[in-house]
């Protein structure tokens, strides 16, 4: 039977569409072909080694890591892992997931997977520093990062040894969510190997060069007989300025009452607390430097309410960082915060005067616009919690 030409073309088109549909289905199935066999692997009862993962790409390794957690119902933010797990019949998402559900064998297997991932990264990423406990970093391997990413990388070196970061709740939460993290009752900075100490120094050096800052927390020993200028302080956050100011006292052994400052300086290898030191003993360049830092802090505090915040100023910050800036605007007017850490943080500032009757009507037009700018940035900002999951 002969078909009309138009009908013949229609039939060919339909057949072609059917072919494409089948081809797309095969392709979709093949997308996960490399990791499919790992779905039935007993990660709880059997150990794997790096050789078992040799044929896997970075993308595949990420999905295998997702399988280990996915068997316990972990919900991922990473779009690739999330999409993959949602296609698996065995995956039962659970909002109650906790790393405590992983046994020692699973944790050991995750170590192998994560360290294999780290070895394939062209430059280090948050989550990679355990590969460098006894391996020196290079400038090229460190690459470039945002200020917040530098913070995570440096903190990770110390978190491996159990350091807590209660002074930065988002950073503490970040490590609390790492399956390998074990907070120490008493962190000892001397537990870092010589290589880790050199890696920290290199991270700090490159971070500073990329941020174009002249001084940072940890540098006060260089200014025992040298004056700090306002120009040197430009580019530092309010949090860093406060650490820098208190470091002048810490170098003399000041015992801090504020918990997060206790923990921060208690984690520094040079800190030697002295109960006999009195703040009024500060003199010479030390006293002048504190006054310079305080004056610059006050200047920045006042600018938040008098000058517009630009997007360029916020660029590269985690959402957790800009929230602190947002809270600062309210704190300047005495807002009492429901969050315990936030309230304690601002209560430790001399300028903070709590006002239970605070009302947003007391905010200036500039402050209100700054809050709008910060809110817009928050919607797009990456959370510290989603830098690397696992």
Image: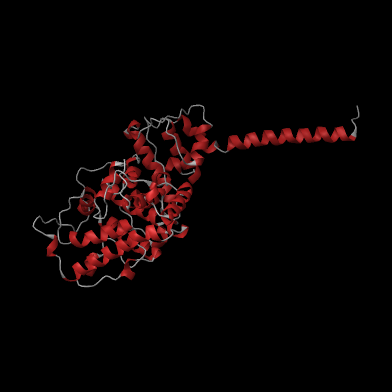
Q: Quadrant of residue 235?
A: bottom left
Give the left or right position of residue 197, taking residue 5 as reference.
left
Residue 335 visible in image: yes
Does residue 270 appear to the left or right of 211 in the view shown?
left
Question: Disc count in the image?
Answer: 0
Closer to the camera in the image, 239 or 90: 239
Image color mode: secondary structure
- Whole-percent x, y for residue 330 in the image: 35, 49
Q: Is residue 45 above or below residue 237?
A: above
In the displayed orientation, state which residue is furthest to the left.
276
Which residue is more in the foreground, 288 or 235? 288
- In the picture, the quarter occupied by the N terminus is top right
- Which quadrant of the view contains residue 162? top left
Q: Position of residue 180 (x, y in %)?
A: 32, 41
Q: Does residue 202 appear in the picture of this structure? A: no
**Where's the C terminus, which quadrant?**
top left
- Taking the view exactly as shown, the residue that stands out farthest to the bottom is 226
Q: Nearer the viewer, residue 49 or 160?
A: 160
| Residue 237 x, y percent position in the rendering | 34, 59
Residue shown at the point (39%, 37%) measured from the top left: 48
Q: Residue 35, image x and y in percent? A: 50, 37
Residue appearing at x 23%, y 69% in the figure: 223
């Amino acid at each position: 039977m002969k078909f009309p030409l138009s009908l013949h073309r229609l039939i060919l088109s339909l057949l072609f569409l059917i072919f494409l549909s089948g081809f797309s289905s095969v392709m979709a199935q093949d997308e996960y072909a490399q990791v499919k066999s790992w779905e039935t692997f007993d990660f709880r009862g059997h150990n794997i080694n790096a050789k078992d993962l040799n044929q896997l790409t970075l993308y595949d390794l990420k999905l295998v890591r997702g399988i280990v957690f996915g068997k316990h119902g972990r919900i991922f933010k990473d779009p690739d892992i999330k999409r993959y797990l949602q296609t698996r019949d065995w995956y039962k998402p659970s909002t109650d997931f906790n790393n405590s559900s992983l046994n020692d064998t699973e944790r050991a297997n995750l170590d192998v997977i994560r360290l294999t991932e780290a070895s394939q990264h062209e430059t280090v990423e948050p989550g990679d520093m355990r590969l460098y406990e006894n391996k020196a970093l290079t400038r090229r391997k460190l690459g470039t990062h945002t200020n917040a990413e530098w913070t995570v990388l440096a903190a990770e070196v110390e978190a491996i040894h159990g350091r807590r970061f209660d002074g930065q709740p988002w950073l503490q939460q970040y490590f609390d969510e790492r399956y390998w993290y074990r907070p120490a009752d008493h962190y000892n900075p001397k537990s870092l190997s010589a290589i880790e100490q050199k890696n920290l120094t290199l991270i700090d050096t490159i971070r500073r060069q990329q941020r174009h800052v002249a001084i940072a927390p940890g540098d006060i020993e260089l200014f025992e007989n040298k004056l700090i200028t306002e120009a040197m302080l430009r580019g530092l956050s309010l949090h860093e300025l406060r650490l820098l100011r208190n470091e002048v006292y810490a170098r003399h052994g000041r015992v801090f009452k504020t918990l997060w400052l206790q923990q921060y300086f208690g984690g520094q290898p040079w800190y030697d607390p002295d109960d006999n030191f009195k703040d009024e003993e500060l003199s010479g360049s030390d006293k002048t430097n504190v006054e310079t830092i305080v004056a610059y802090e006050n200047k920045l505090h006042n600018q938040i309410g008098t000058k517009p915040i630009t997007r360029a100023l916020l660029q590269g910050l985690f959402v957790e960082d800009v929230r602190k800036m947002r809270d600062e605007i309210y704190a300047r007017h005495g807002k009492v915060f429901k969050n315990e850490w936030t309230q304690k943080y601002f209560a430790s500032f001399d300028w903070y005067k709590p006002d239970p009757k605070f009302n947003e009507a007391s905010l200036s037009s500039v402050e209100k616009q700054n809050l709008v700018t910060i809110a817009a940035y928050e919607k797009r900002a990456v959370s510290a919690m989603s830098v690397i999951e696992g």
